[in-house]
């Protein structure tokens, strides 16, 4: 059980923030007089106003903020049996984070190379997959948004929407059939005499990376298409008339305009890749390094929930860093990314 | 051969390649569901069979998971659509300086890996149910619903927000001038205006819930859903029965997606017709 003082802090802080904003709003209102129309309750009617506030508080606080704060708190506690929790041994500690760095809760002699490598590889590969997905999707998104006839676009859209809803696990499974040692590609290659021994695509992580690329392809496609679609075709014509070569048009006209879509697709693909669980579980070989399954194992194999929370925190911070970096880099706002 | 022709050829080749990549693995998987060998195999095709489908219906765990997935999906729709609606309406009215913080909080689950939402939900509710003595609430279906609703509500909110951008408050003022109460305005003007968005949000919410794995696998505790059973099976070994299941799921999804599109188009057409009639009058 969480320390009562911490629990009080977790529950009280958001309420203080809300009260502060309400106080500010009331002060603002008084200062401006009654020029600005009816208040919240008058505007919506009391029953609806109560529903709106109740629902938003339930969602924002009980479903989102409190659980996240609880997880933060949990990650700074030692692993203890149920009875000892909340007792004198339940102190605040950095041991879970220390374990991530050094592979031991006490000494700091050696780096925890397995977990650190998995972490870096996850970030690195997710970044590469994000870029690859952009490269694969951009031409088709551009073609659909600016070149193709409406009828063609409609047909292509249907073709894209159908696979969009297919489960991540099944996508991974499809790649296992394709790339397993007894899979289609190996069988065909052997029959054609290209190779004599089956290639271990799964052991070499080829299957995993291909599967991840595949799984999140359409996540990149739709924001990209929406962004390019709203570009006025006259701008492209103008650039062409002024003698811009085709790659200039893409690099200096279309892409800058589609920035919000690119940022949106990139953050989502990166987040989904770095947080992917099904694909690494299904397509990972015995030596595969991916961060999410390690988090998963903290819970279900080591039964070390505080440590799992700490690992989850590390993943969360990484994703937050990536999102804010993308926002900086592309100079877009959060509302543009999540449109 | 003109340069234009070469361009077109390259473009066609690229599009064909793209869709081959998109559909190829799925088609391969589909074919293995009908082939006789124990290992999912496309080629050589040794014989046509439907046995793998028959095996599915006899699978207790799978059926139990399927039922749970439907129950959770229904709960998530019932929870996320109202939450998303309230979240969106509040977004248009909230005190300005508080808006960006509010937006950041309610949209953050979209940008958070699903495993983290699942983990934090379990940790939070374990403590809450222990503190309040409501241990019966600490069950998989309840937690999976709440965990999924945390981010699915955000999808719903984004759908409502884009619809609300086109909302004309003049109608609302007219109704109020004619003596309607605010509550009547909400039910008789705002909700009917939002109906297409409510439909979209419900469909998206159900599909997202149904196919979710990352959040569910933590929040479901000892229970099971279709996706967690599926993941267990896929990890345990590859059999064509999984391919058969995939064929069924893909079939259902495709039918669902098509029905959804048809209903949505019909709604749009009706709306356009209404707008035309108004313009003519």
Image (tube, coloured by chain):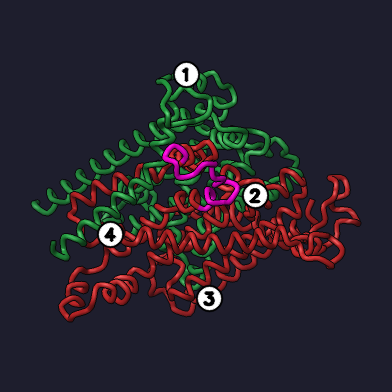
Chain colours: A red, B green
Q: Nearer the viewer, mark 2 or mark 3?
A: 2
Q: Are marks 4 and 3 on the same chain?
A: no
In 3D space, how far apart are the residues under numbered discs 1 and 4 (Cα atoms)? 57 Å
- Labels 1, 4: one chain: yes
Q: Are marks 1 and 3 on the same chain?
A: no
In this orientation, which residue lies closer to the viewer: A69 or B178?
Answer: A69
Q: Give the extent of the magenta segment.
A: A190-209
Q: Residues within 10 Å of mark 2 (few under 14, many from 20)?
A: many
Q: Residues within 10 Å of mark 1 (few under 14, many from 20)?
A: some
Report the residue marked by disc 4. B168
Q: Is residue A33 above or below residue B115?
A: below
Query: Which label was assigned to residue A27?
Result: 3
What residue sits 52% from the left and 55% below the top?
A272
Instruction: Using the image, tell me which numbered label, if any, was put on residue B51.
Output: 1
Residue A116 in the figure: left or right of residue A60: right
User: Furthest residue to the right?
Assistant: A88
Spatial distance from mark 2 to mark 3, Cα to Cα?
50 Å
Residue under label 2, please give it.
A293
In the image, A42 versus A231, the foreground residue is A231
Q: Measure the alpha-carbon separation of dots 1 and 2.
A: 34 Å
Instruction: Estimate the x, y position of residue A307 in percent, counting from the top left.
Output: 75, 55
Residue at left 21%, top 72%? A236
Q: Give me the residue at 64% from left, 44% from top.
A: B218
Q: Nearer the viewer, residue A269 or B148?
A: A269
- Residue B186 on image: x %, y %: 37, 50
Q: Residue at x 71, y 55 (%)?
A: A309
Q: Is residue A203 magenta?
A: yes
Question: Magenta span: helix, strand or loop, mainly?
Answer: loop
B49 in the magenta segment = no
SS type, badge 2 = helix
């Amino acid at each position: 059980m969480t320390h009562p003082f911490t629990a009080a802090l977790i529950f009280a802080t958001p309420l203080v923030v809300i009260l502060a904003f309400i106080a500010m709003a009331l002060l603002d209102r008084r200062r401006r007089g009654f020029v600005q129309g009816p208040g919240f309750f008058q505007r919506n009617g009391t029953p609806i106003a109560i529903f709106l506030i109740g629902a938003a508080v339930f969602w924002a606080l009980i479903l989102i903020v409190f659980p996240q704060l609880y997880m933060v708190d949990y990650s700074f506690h030692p692993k203890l049996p149920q009875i000892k929790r909340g007792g004198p041994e339940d102190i605040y500690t950095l041991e879970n984070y220390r374990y991530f760095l050094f592979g031991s809760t006490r000494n700091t002699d050696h780096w925890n190379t397995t977990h650190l490598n998995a972490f870096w590889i996850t970030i690195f590969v997710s970044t590469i997959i994000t870029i690859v997905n952009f490269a694969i999707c951009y031409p088709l998104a551009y073609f659909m948004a600016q070149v193709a006839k409406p009828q063609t676009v409609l047909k292509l859209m249907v073709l894209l929407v159908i696979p969009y809803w297919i489960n991540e696990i099944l996508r991974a499974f499809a790649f296992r059939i394709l790339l397993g040692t007894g899979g289609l590609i190996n069988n065909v290659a052997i029959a054609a005499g290209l190779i004599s021994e089956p290639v271990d695509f799964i052991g070499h992580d080829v299957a995993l990376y291909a599967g991840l690329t595949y799984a999140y392809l359409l996540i990149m496609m739709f924001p990209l298409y929406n962004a390019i679609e709203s570009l006025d075709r006259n701008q492209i014509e103008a650039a062409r008339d002024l003698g811009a070569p085709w790659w200039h048009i893409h690099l200096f006209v279309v892409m800058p305009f589609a920035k919000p879509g690119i940022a949106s697709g990139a953050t989502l693909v990166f987040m989904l890749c770095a947080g992917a669980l099904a694909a690494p579980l299904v397509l990972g070989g015995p030596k595969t390094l991916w961060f999410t399954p390690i988090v998963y194992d903290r819970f279900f194999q080591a039964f070390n929930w505080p440590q799992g929370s700490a690992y989850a925190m590390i993943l969360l911070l990484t994703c937050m860093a990536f999102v804010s970096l993308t926002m900086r880099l592309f100079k877009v706002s959060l509302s543009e990314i999540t449109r | 051969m003109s340069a234009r022709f070469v361009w077109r050829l390259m473009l066609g080749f690229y599009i064909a390649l793209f869709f081959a990549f998109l559909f190829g693995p799925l088609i391969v998987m589909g074919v293995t569901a009908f082939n006789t060998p124990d290992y999912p195999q496309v080629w050589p095709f040794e014989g046509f069979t439907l046995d793998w489908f028959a095996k599915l219906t006899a699978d207790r765990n799978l059926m139990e998971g399927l039922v749970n997935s439907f129950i959770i999906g229904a709960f998530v729709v019932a929870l996320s659509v109202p939450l998303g609606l309230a979240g969106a309406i509040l977004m248009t009215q909230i005190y300005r300086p508080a808006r960006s913080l509010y937006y950041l909080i309610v949209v953050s689950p979209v940008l958070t890996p699903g495993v983290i939402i699942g983990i934090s939900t379990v940790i939070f509710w374990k403590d809450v149910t222990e503190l309040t003595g409501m241990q019966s609430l600490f069950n998989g279906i309840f937690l999976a619903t709440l965990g999924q609703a945390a981010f699915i509500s955000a999808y719903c909110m984004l759908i409502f927000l884009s619809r609300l951008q086109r909302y004309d408050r003049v109608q609302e003022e007219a109704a109020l001038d004619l003596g309607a109460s605010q509550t009547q305005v909400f039910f008789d003007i705002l909700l009917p205006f939002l109906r297409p968005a409510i439909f979209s949000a419900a469909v998206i919410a159900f599909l997202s819930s149904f196919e979710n794995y990352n959040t569910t696998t933590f929040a479901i505790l000892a229970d099971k859903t279709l996706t967690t059973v599926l993941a267990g099976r896929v990890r345990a070994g590859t059999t064509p029965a999984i391919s058969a299941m995939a064929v069924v799921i893909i079939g259902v999804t495709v039918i669902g997606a098509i029905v959804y599109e048809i209903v949505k188009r019909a709604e749009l057409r009706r709306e356009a017709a209404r707008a035309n009639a108004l313009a003519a009058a």
